[in-house]
Image (cartoon, rainbow, N blue to C red):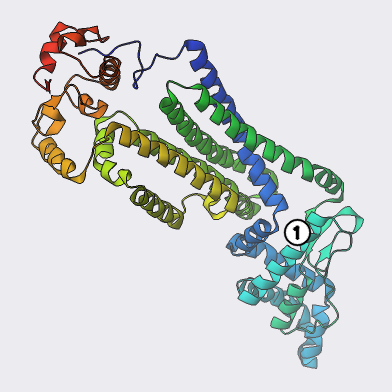
């Protein structure tokens, strides 16, 4: 039996090509804007959110390659500010004081090893976290002078690790009292010629981020709105768009990483540290890509549950009795949301605003699915579900599963779809035709339904009754 080529899966007129093209173009443009928004959101969070900055810097210090690089910095600061050779010579007996030079050189290697061990301890990491928090707060507020571990003098922002260098000196047995200033070990966060540009661009970055996010979401919503007769298909396209954009974010992160590591590393020995710096520094970007893929999968699952496949229709018939009771239906939704957030596959689920938006969309989609299910199964009960599944397991065709012919005057769209050869659009057309005739329809009248001929009517007699 052929479906009416001029109707869509819900029996409505097929969309015109211009309207479909407009919606598709909106989805394409929204996807491009979303890709730009993903990088803008990452930059905004990484540069302007202190908690994100501190979390990233803490992860950096936990990396062995970064610990090694910072260890060298601390030891250099120690030897630049403390006369290690003189202290060693003073500690040695007169007859071997000539060995002070080699001993101080050996002590340097020992100090480098001790620095790595120190940076792995909780107290040192707490000092590192405090220093980074202070530095970033000074960066965001753009105040001169900073705090004990911050310098924004001459327009530069630096991370000062002098306190950690002092602890390192104490650990290797050197007298460092009042010899190591707080700014002895510095990591330059931003050069003076870059600071003014970042200061002037910070507000612009936040504004652009919000504009890109709002425009991308707005265009996606407008595309779904314009797809009046094929919204399920449009929503499926949006789901795939989210997955594709998320995958592109991950791919571009990897490709850009190769270029950035190459530019940061002055020699092959620097590449591991540069690679760790990029990998950890773009963790938030990776989380954004994974989040977009997760949201896309959720959208695809929703379109599948609302679709016209036999499995989707079976699911809706099976769940219809629960959906009929609102409190049961939303209890199921609450359970799904709780499990989803406990698993938390998307980084956005740990943030309030994205979580609220996701929950609102889940509620809207769930209510649409619930109403669709109840329209298709207005009289469904658990007693009806059991024989249906028993009938399907034995391969019955009549009434789709029970082996009992259904009434043409009361058959639902879902029941008609279960008849072999009857698709969603034909089933909908039959129900609409019956309603136009006030429920009084004979088998002969069905030939007036588009896509149904005399031969089809004879086939329907085996499954329907007046």
Q: Position of residue 51 (x, y in %)?
A: 66, 59
Q: Position of residue 289 (x, y in %)?
A: 53, 42
Please tell me in which quadrant of the rendered image residue 213 appears. top right
Residue at label 1? 136
* 120 lies above or below 334: below
Please tell me in which quadrant of the rendered image residue 316 appears. top left
Q: Is 44 or 307 nearer to us in this picture? A: 307
Q: From this viewpoint, which residue is outermost toward the right? A: 154
Would you say 286 lies left or right of 143 here? left
Residue at image point 25% right, 29% down: 414
**Image quadrant in which the C terminus is located:** top left
Evaluate whether residue 188 shows in this view. Answer: yes
Residue at image point 86% right, 81% down: 178
**Image quadrant in which the N terminus is located:** top left
Please tell me in which quadrant of the rendered image residue 102 appears. bottom right
Q: Is 426 or 431 nearer to us in this picture? A: 431
**Residue count near mark 1 (Cα–Cα under 10 Å), binned few <14, some 14–19, many ≥20:** many
* 118 lies above or below 189: below
Evaluate whether residue 265 shows in this view. Answer: no
Q: Position of residue 326 (x, y in %)?
A: 36, 47
Would you say 210 lies left or right of 183 here? left
Q: Position of residue 12 (x, y in %)?
A: 38, 17
Q: Is 93 or 125 nearer to us in this picture? A: 125
Residue at image point 36% right, 39% down: 370
């Amino acid at each position: 039996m052929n479906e009416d080529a001029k109707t869509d899966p819900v029996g409505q007129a097929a969309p015109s090509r211009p309207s479909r093209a407009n919606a598709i173009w909106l989805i394409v443009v929204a996807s491009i804007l979303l890709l730009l928004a993903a990088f803008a959101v990452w930059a905004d969070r990484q540069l302007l959110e202190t908690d994100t900055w501190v979390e990233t810097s803490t992860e950096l210090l936990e990396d062995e390659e970064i610990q090694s690089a910072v260890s060298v910095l601390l030891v250099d600061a120690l030897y630049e500010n403390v006369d290690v050779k003189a202290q060693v010579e003073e500690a040695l007996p007169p007859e071997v004081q000539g060995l002070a030079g080699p001993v101080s050189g050996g002590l340097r290697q020992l100090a480098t090893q001790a620095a790595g061990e120190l940076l792995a301890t909780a107290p040192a990491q707490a000092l590192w976290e405090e220093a980074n928090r202070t530095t970033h707060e000074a960066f965001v507020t753009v105040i001169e002078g900073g705090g004990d571990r911050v310098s924004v003098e001459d327009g530069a922002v630096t991370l000062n690790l002098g306190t950690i260098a002092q602890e390192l000196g104490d650990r290797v047995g050197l007298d460092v009292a009042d010899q190591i200033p707080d700014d002895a070990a510095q990591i330059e966060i931003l050069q003076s010629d870059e600071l003014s540009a970042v200061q002037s661009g910070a507000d612009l970055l936040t504004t652009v981020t919000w504009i890109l996010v709002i425009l991308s979401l707005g265009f996606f919503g407008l595309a779904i709105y314009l797809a009046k007769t094929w919204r399920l298909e449009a929503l499926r396209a949006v789901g795939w768009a989210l997955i594709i954009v998320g995958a592109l974010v991950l791919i571009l992160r990897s490709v850009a990483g190769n270029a950035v590591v190459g530019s940061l590393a002055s020699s092959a020995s620097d590449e591991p540290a540069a690679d760790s710096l990029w990998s950890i520094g773009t963790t938030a970007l990776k989380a954004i890509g994974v989040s977009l893929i997760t949201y896309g999968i959720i959208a695809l699952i929703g379109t599948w549950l609302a679709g016209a496949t036999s499995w989707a229709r079976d699911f809706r018939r099976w769940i219809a009795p629960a959906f009929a009771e609102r409190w049961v239906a939303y209890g199921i939704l609450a359970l799904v949301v709780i499990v989803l957030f406990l698993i938390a596959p998307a980084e956005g689920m740990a943030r309030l605003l994205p979580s609220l938006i996701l929950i609102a969309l889940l509620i809207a989609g769930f209510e649409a699915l619930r109403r669709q299910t109840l329209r298709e199964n207005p009289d469904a009960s658990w007693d009806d579900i059991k024989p249906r599944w028993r009938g399907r397991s034995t391969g019955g065709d009549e009434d789709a599963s029970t082996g009992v012919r259904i009434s043409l005057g009361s058959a639902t769209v879902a029941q008609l779809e279960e008849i072999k050869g009857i698709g969603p659009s034909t089933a909908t057309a039959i129900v609409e035709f019956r309603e136009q005739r006030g429920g009084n329809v004979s088998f002969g009248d069905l030939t007036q339904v588009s896509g149904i001929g005399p031969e089809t009517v004879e086939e329907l007699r085996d499954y329907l009754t007046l």
